[in-house]
């Protein structure tokens, strides 16, 4: 059985989203080619499996406080 191909991830830095308004950051991430964007409140309990093509935002007071791939 052939492996399932993974989508290419955009080559921008997650640090570029920190400090942006969360709605703007989500739009920008999708425009740059991220397949999935997940916005989370600080301290949220989440699954930690790596998903290629996904960008995670920790959002506090409407702004991206932290951002990471997967």
Image (cartoon, rainbow, N blue to C red):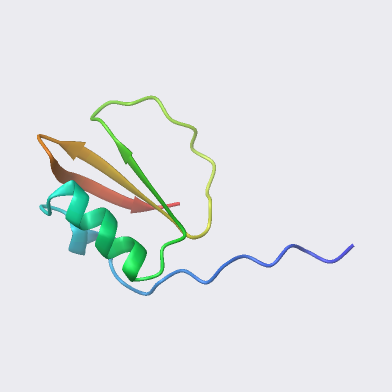
Q: Is residue 7 above or below residue 63?
A: below
From the top left corner, tell me how far across and down residue 68 is, in percent: 33, 52
Q: Is residue 13 above or below residue 58?
A: below
Q: Is residue 62 above or below residue 31?
A: above
Residue located 47% across and 60% down the image: 35
Using the rendered view, name the quadrant where residue 33 is placed: bottom left
From the top left corner, tell me how far across and down residue 69 is, in percent: 39, 55
Residue located 73% across and 62% down the image: 4
From the top left corner, tell me how far across and down residue 60 is, in percent: 14, 35
**Number of numbered discs:** 0
Identity of the residue furthest to the bottom in this view: 11
Residue 18 shown left or right of residue 55 in the figure = left
From the top left corner, tell me how far across and down residue 40 is, in percent: 30, 35
Using the rendered view, name the quadrant where residue 31 is placed: bottom left
Residue located 12% across and 39% down the image: 62
Q: In this view, does 17 lie above or below 47?
A: below
Identity of the residue furthest to the right in this view: 1
In the rendered image, the quadrant that contains the N terminus is bottom right
């Amino acid at each position: 059985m052939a492996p399932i191909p993974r989508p290419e991830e955009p080559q921008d830095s997650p640090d570029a989203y920190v400090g942006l308004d969360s709605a703007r950051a989500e739009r920008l991430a999708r425009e740059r080619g991220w397949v999935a964007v997940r916005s989370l409140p600080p301290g949220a309990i989440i699954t930690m499996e790596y998903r290629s093509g996904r960008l995670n935002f920790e959002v506090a007071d409407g702004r991206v406080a932290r951002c990471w791939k997967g």
